[in-house]
Amino acid sequence: MEMERSGLLVILSSPSGAGKSTLARQLMDWDPGLRFSVSATTRRPRPGEVEGEHYYFRTAEQFRAMVAAGEMLEHAEVFGNFYGTPRGPVEEAMRAGRDTLFDVDWQGGQQIRASSLGGHVISIFVLPPSLAELERRLISRQQDAPEVIAGRMRKSRDEISHWAEYDYVIVNDDLDRSAEALKTILRAERMRRARQVGLGPFVRALMEEESA
């Protein structure tokens, strides 16, 4: 039987190009009930990106106002643009027992873990099999200019240096195997005794039945 439980905050981080966005999509396809956290950003929309589905696109002034009002669970500046997670939808999903998936960098992960919701966090870091493969993936995406790719490669070492801050680490040398590892982690974390808020009443009912 499925026990009532509190919602999880699932943090997925990696250097750009290591595959976390692809893995996040696969996890969402596997569990349609998993809620993807839509971030706010000040960067310009890329072709095909939809407001409210991929990001909430805001001006720098609007973004700063949200931070000042305490409406962001986390925020950071990355490559000259601001990114952040609105707090309200995350808290609502958690209370309803729904898990929220975060595609954030190590800075965002630190802030979420340090927040009042930190006790509900599980964090996973995705590593590339090599830096050469990481660069090949960035080039093959054909989304960024060569100088942007060079900047991402320089930043990747700093991102990777934070791997030990995470609960789990996956080396993404095989996409299918990495996706299965993610599912295994999520299944196990959902079964933790402390997360199953309906377990206490269920056990008490069992004991009463046994003694009747």
Image (cartoon, helix red, strand yellow):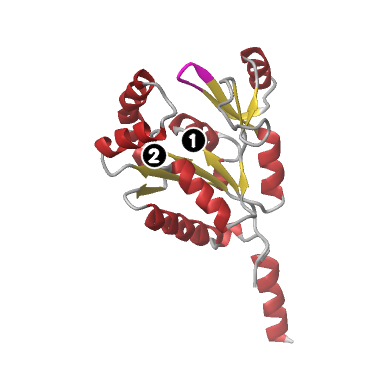
**Residue 52 placement, left or right of 165:** right
Residue 109 is labelled as 1
Return the x and y of residue 27 as percentages of the image width and height. 52, 53
Toward the bottom, the furthest residue is: 212
- Tag 2, which secondary structure? helix
Q: What is the crowding at mark 1: few (fewer than 14 residues within 10 Å), some, or many (at least 20)? A: many
Q: Nearer the viewer, residue 186 or 138?
A: 138
> Vertical placement of 43 versus 125: above or below?
above
Q: Residue at x 34, y 42 (%)?
A: 127
Amino acid under label 2? Glu
Amino acid under label 1? Gly
Toward the top, the furthest residue is: 61
**Quarter holding residue 38:** top right
Residue wearing tag 2: 165
Which stretch is magenta? 77-81
- Tell me the CA gap for discs 1 and 2: 9 Å
**Quarter holding residue 55:** top right
**Residue 109 placement, left or right of 39:** left
Return the x and y of residue 183 as percentages of the image width and height. 48, 58
Task: Assess whether mark 2 and mark 1 are in contact (beta carbons under 8 angstroms).
Answer: yes
Please check the rendered image and state whether residue 98 is part of the magenta-colored stretch, yes or no.
no
